[in-house]
Amino acid sequence: MFDRRKFLKIGAVATTAAVAGGVSLNAKAAKDLPIRGNKDFSPTTGKERKAIPSACWQCVTRCSNMGYVEDGRLVKIEPNINSIRTGGTLCSKGQGAVNHTYDPDRILHPMRRVGARGEGKWKRISWDEALTEVAARMKKNRDAGTPEKVVYHYGRAKASHSKTVGGFFKAFGTGSIGNHTSICEGGKWSAQELTWGGHFDNWDFDNTKFVLNFGSNFLETHTNHIPVAHRMLKAMADRGVEMVTFDVRLSNTAAKSREWIAPKVGTDAAIILAMTNVVMKEGLYKGAGEEMLKYTRVSEDVNADVATKIKAIKAHVAGYTPAWAEKLSGVPASKITALAREFATKTPAVLVTYRGVVAHYNGNEGERAAKLLCAVTGQIDKPGCRMKAVGAGWKFPKIKSNAKRKLNIFDGFPGQAAYPTHHVSHQVLKMIKDGSAGRPDMYITYCYTPAYANGDVQENIDILKDEKLIPFYVSVDPFYGDSTMYADLILPDTPFTERWTAEDMVSPSQVAEFYIRQPFTKPMGEARDFSDVVFDLAKRLGVDMGAAKSHEDYVRMACEATPGVKEAGGFEYMKKVGVWHDKNAKPQGPVYKTPIPESVYKAKGVVLDKASGVYWKPASEADAKKGYVGTKKAFKKYVAQKMPHGVFSGFAPDAVNKSGYLELWSPLLKAKGFNPLPTWMAIPEHQKMAKDDLHLTTFKYATHSHSRTMNCKYLAEVYHTNPAWINPATAKERGIFDGDNIKVTSPTGEFVTKAQLTEAIMPGVVAVSHHCGHWAYGRYASDRRAPGEGSDSRGDRDYKMKWWDDNGVHPNWAIPNSADPINGQQRWMDTVVKVTRV
Amino acid sequence: MLQVVTNNVSDGHPDSEARTAIEVCHLYGLLASLFRAEPTHELLQVLRSPELSQLFTEAGFNIEEDLAEIGDDDTLLEKLAVEFTALFLGPGGHISPHESVQADPDGGSLWGDETLAVKHFIEGLDLAFTEEYTGLPDHISVELDLMANLAGHEAQGWEQNDLTRAANALAYQQDFMQEHLLRWVPLFCKKIIETADLAFYRGVARMTRDFLASEAEDIKRRLELAGPPPTPTS
């Protein structure tokens, strides 16, 4: 046995020169050790590489990273070890982003279409020509009093990007600004805004004891992927935290779980409601649940006491028995009961929900049901549970908006979605085709590929190609992509590796992290960051962009104005370190319990809205008469919530006129004809399935994002083709063998792929990943080079080593663009298909 | 399975942690010197001094006894030199004391990737090789010297009550322990224990193996005590 205590005594006397350490090494100068940090060296020359802290953009998580530059060339991307969000980790997508900069099919010059749309004939033009043309078209619309006909539609624009680019279009005068959140997780966000206000939830894996996961593959991909994934793995390894995952497919997250449970497609909401039934029936709400219910609204009466609330919930969920849920979901009632008990007693526990729950017709209700289950078990917004998220609150320079007019094409057709607070972006092209809400004269896309990213690909292409529907299409893109190819004008954007941004994504540590993106290298060719281009356009159009002169300038000003960042050293500090957080800050805990003093809620102009119990500050007498819920954007005037036991900060609203309760009984939904309490809604398409119909669901692999990574050769080599997962039993019924070509057909369209027979998918379902099947986006994604200047002469010596011909298929040819009736979320998982052997 | 008693003389007080770090520094130095070359007269004197010899025995390593078996000093030094050569230098079959060779289960080459990684680690600390040292960067004696150096910095941090400085040095120690030493030294020591003719080198190998295992644990404790390591400009 080795006794350290005794052994160390040897060290106390072994001090003579003969045995002292340091014989082989000397300090170069008499000084302390350098601070430990990211370093990298050239394997050929041994020279230290320049390390530049920056931030990723491969997915919306936007992790801090570190780029290494050798002789002016970006050679490697690693994590930034100083980030509290990522804990010094970065996913494969982030590391593979090094390929973006040197993508042989990058667009390096502004290009003007010369043939028919989509024909691929282009002429190189100067930036001056390009911007003159864009500015003239914008000016024409402004002069005609129709600035809203300039439509700006982005896929991802965050933090300072959003402020500058979006700010420019608003300052110009158009409110026609769209995003693509409805094809991501907009539905979840809207549902959270309806219940607890604030769209984002953080899963506090650092402090949890149990994780119940419905439909999230967060170890492979997620809106806040690496920051939560590495925490979950740490929780599993260090504390033995167990997870149970509901998913129709054995994702890698399900595989890492204690149990994988495969429910029938679209029935998660029923299971969650049945778990609530168990909790109520067995009195598992007592204690923490009762305390939470003080801050929760479950009936029209905002003054109801807890006992009355319990009675109301019991009555509501009485029919949602585990046996009822078993019939719908196929999950045994005994399993539902056991997990309900475990979730309610192994506290604090996290309830995870994502697209497996929300990308359905009943997604909004699935998410609201999750909030109900969390509420009755007292597991809302406290350590170890799902918490209100914390992001960086930058002090950005102001850009004044002049947007008074907009085309109503972003929220779906009238009546299609009740509260699409994150819009119905996948319907935008369809609405342009319809024309009843007006059409753009100029359609500008930024970091967005509408043809590929949305469902019903053929219709998207047909609309983009039709000059009568879209007279002028400008694509701002670093690459020649599946939508860019239909543009009239391409403005070559920089990949994120050559950009500035002040970034703000949520930190699961519950302490805000401020971080920046800075260029690893100078933009290649004539590529320009669109956030800089808008400053140029603003000058041409006389648009006031405020004090900043460029995007870098804007980021610098934000660093110098933001408390904490400023004191740490501002812009120079951020350029050097990349990240900053307040080391003395305590993790944000519950936000709803803060008592509000009388001086605030009885201040001049503040009134009590008796129907909702909300203290608010109506702008006028008329608004006060209309009441809080009925007044447009009244939530902006929210002050506090009156509850029977006091006046509190509450779950403050931020997008809709909800009360300050955790609002599970929603007057807003009632007003639109929905059940105000979280309710099971059957998926219409699933009620009339023929015997041989299958469900089509989609998913993502860890190495790719939905649409933007297949051009990265390192990532494409890892994953480039996507056979359809099909259960052997389901395949047998159709005479399908492993590796057979199969045709997947829906009323929207069809595609052919190979069958991958696997028990890792439940019977009755065919699952196809996104990412693949590009018809453009460069040689690694599609084997098609970008046309135009430079691409014939630009090569990539690795391309001849591309050993795969099969670039996979895109499932969206067969998936319709459809919307959750409450929040407008694209229903990725509701498609019904027929699958036949080819 | 190796059993390690990790109870420490330290009580969490900076002075006591400083003492521990100094002891750790010296132990790394001692072990480095034992692997650097065949023992000299001076080293032998130190090892056989009554005070140290007693401490070795108490710690479970009977160096005095191991050495006494061999004979008088000249014979002893000769035999130790022959053993050192056979074990670590060759020619012919020997146990290369270089990480790049040992890290590869099939036998890596000298100046491999690990050599470069150690070189970069050292240069990243603004340390340079002394003129006298002409060996490779990933020789075990260099790796142990490096740890001695880092433990020295740690000790200064504790002595000055500068916990950030201590944490920085500890974080480096943890990195190097996990990324390098633990990846190859335990197996290297096992080979010595299985191969050495003289009990002395089997003892050195056991000491090294056990000390690293105990340090790997104690670094974590000291790091927790010192708090989070600093960021580049904090």
Image (tube, helix red, strand yellow):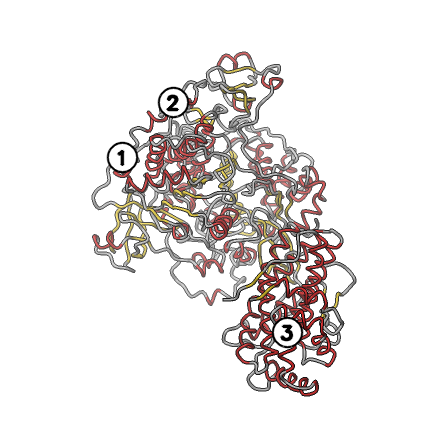
**Distance from label 2 to label 3 (Cα)?**
75 Å
Q: Position of residue A362 (x, y in %)?
A: 35, 34
Crowd rating for badge 3 (residues with CA inside 10 Å; few <14, some 14–19, many 20+): many
* Left or right: residue A307 compared with residue A550: left
Say if labels 2 and 3 share a chain. Answer: no
Q: Secondary structure at mark 3?
A: loop
Q: As shown in the figure, which amino acid type bears the numbered disc 3?
A: His
Eyeballing the image, is A287 above or below A51? Answer: above
Q: Position of residue B110 (x, y in %)?
A: 59, 77
Q: Which residue is mark 3?
A: B139
Crowd rating for badge 2 (residues with CA inside 10 Å; few <14, some 14–19, many 20+): few
Instruction: Please state which of the two labelled residues, at mark 2 or mark 3, is closer to the viewer.
Output: 3
Q: Which residue is mark 2?
A: A670
Q: Which residue is mark 1?
A: A324
Give the chain of mark 2. Answer: A
Eyeballing the image, is A201 above or below A711? Answer: above
